[in-house]
Each structure stands twice: as C-alpha cells, then as structure tokens.
Image (tube, rainbow, N blue to C red):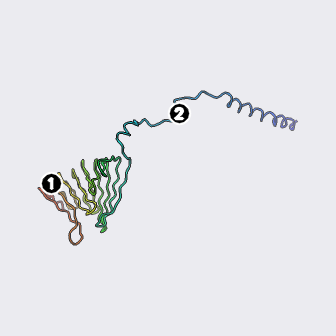
Amino acid sequence: MRSRVVAWLRVLLPLAALAILSTLVLLPNAPDPDAAIPYADVDAEALARDPRMTQPRFSGVAKDGAAVTLIAETASPTEGHDANAERLRMTWRAADGLAADLTAPYGALEGVMIRLNGGVRVTTSNGWAMTVPVLNTDTESGLMIGEGGMTAFAPFGRVDAERMEISRNADGQHVLNLSGGVRLLYQP
C-alpha cells in the first residue's frame, strides 16, 4: 500500500508544481507604474546652463613643502582656469609638522591663490582655534592672510585682531603676525 501511495505522489506532485508555475507565468499581474525604479528629479537645462562638479578635490605641494588639500561640496568654473566653490574643507600640512584644518562656506581658486570666505574656521595642531571672515592662502609661498577681524582661542587665552598673517621667517619657523587692534585676554 505504501509503495502505491509513493508511486502516485511521484506523478501528482510534479504535475501540481507544473500547474502552479504555469499559473504564475500565464496569468501575471499588471505592472504597477508606482513601483517602477525612481529617477532623480533634476533640471537638465539648468545643469547645462550652470556646469559644476560635485565633491571636487584639489591636492598639491607648496614650494615650502606644505601639503595642501582642498575638498568642496560643489565647484563651478569661472573665467580662465579659476573656480568658485561652496562648503570647503582645506587641510594644510607643513613639512615641519605644523598642521591646520580650515572650513568655509564659500571659496574661490584664483590661480595660485585660494580665497576662503563667509566665516573661515581654522584649527591648528598646536592648539589654536581661529575664526576669520576672509582667508587668502598663497599655494606657492604658503602665506596665509586673514582679514576682517579675527578671534582666536589659544592654549593661553583669547586673542582678537583685525588682521592675521601666517608666514615663515628666515629660520623656517612659522610665525603668526597680528595687527590692527590686537587684544589679548590671558587665562593662566
């Protein structure tokens, strides 16, 4: 009796599977247009009129050996070989170990100059945290000039000045020159 049941199941089960598969293939559901692959909603004409790059990266080495890396969220070309960028992050690593990380909402690459503006935040490896409205960096010489009022928090206290300049002296040491109403609040 058992062998008879097994013999019938050997025939009936494959036939049942064939019936189920043919039902799925021959009677499909109508396609749902809402379940289609979503496409990005972009204005192609606006992109053609205003070309730009997303997440561009610029890296180089200044003549003094400092490694400079500039990353932006977006960048668009201007006249010549220059570019404007938004939401920038710049890292500057000198050959002697001094490092600075800079962030700014806006910036421009103008030849060998990187101009950051809109409230630049500078954090250095020796403990300084500065905020300056505009910061110009010469990628050839490594000179940084901040204008429009600077506020810095250093390991020894707070410093305010109208203008700042980071350069190298004759011995190759980095020097921070402050000018224009320098005010120091010393906190031992």
The residues tagged by marks 1 and 2 sit, at their Cα atoms, a distance apart of: 58 Å
Amino acid at the residue labelled 2: Ala
Residue 133 versus residue 186 in the image, above or below = above
Residue contact between numbered discs 1 and 2, judged by CB atoms under 8 Å: no
Tag 2 residue: 36
Amino acid at the residue labelled 1: Glu
10 Å neighbourhood of mark 1: few (<14), some, or many (≥20)? Answer: some
- Tell me where residue 155 sits by quadrant: bottom left
Q: Nearer the viewer, residue 144 or 108?
A: 108
Q: Residue furthest bottom?
A: 171
Q: Residue furthest left?
A: 181
Where the N terminus falls, by quadrant? Answer: top right
Residue at position x 24%, y 70% in the image: 172
Q: Secondary structure at mark 2?
A: loop
- Please provide percent x and percent y for residue 30: 60, 27
| Horizontal arrangement in the rendering, residue 175 relative to residue 49 (left or right) | left
Pair 1/2: label in front: 2
| Horizontal arrangement in the rendering, residue 162 relative to residue 62 (left or right) | left
Labels 1 and 2: the sequence-earlier one? 2
- Please provide percent x and percent y for residue 140: 27, 62
10 Å neighbourhood of mark 2: few (<14), some, or many (≥20)? Answer: few
- Please provide percent x and percent y for residue 20: 71, 31
Residue at position x 23%, y 54% in the image: 135
- Tell me where residue 184 sits by quadrant: bottom left
Q: Secondary structure at mark 1?
A: strand
Q: Nearer the viewer, residue 54 or 148?
A: 54
| Horizontal arrangement in the rendering, residue 174 relative to residue 7 (left or right) | left
Residue 6 versus residue 183 in the image, above or below = above
Q: Nearer the viewer, residue 25 or 79?
A: 79
Residue 162: assigned label: 1
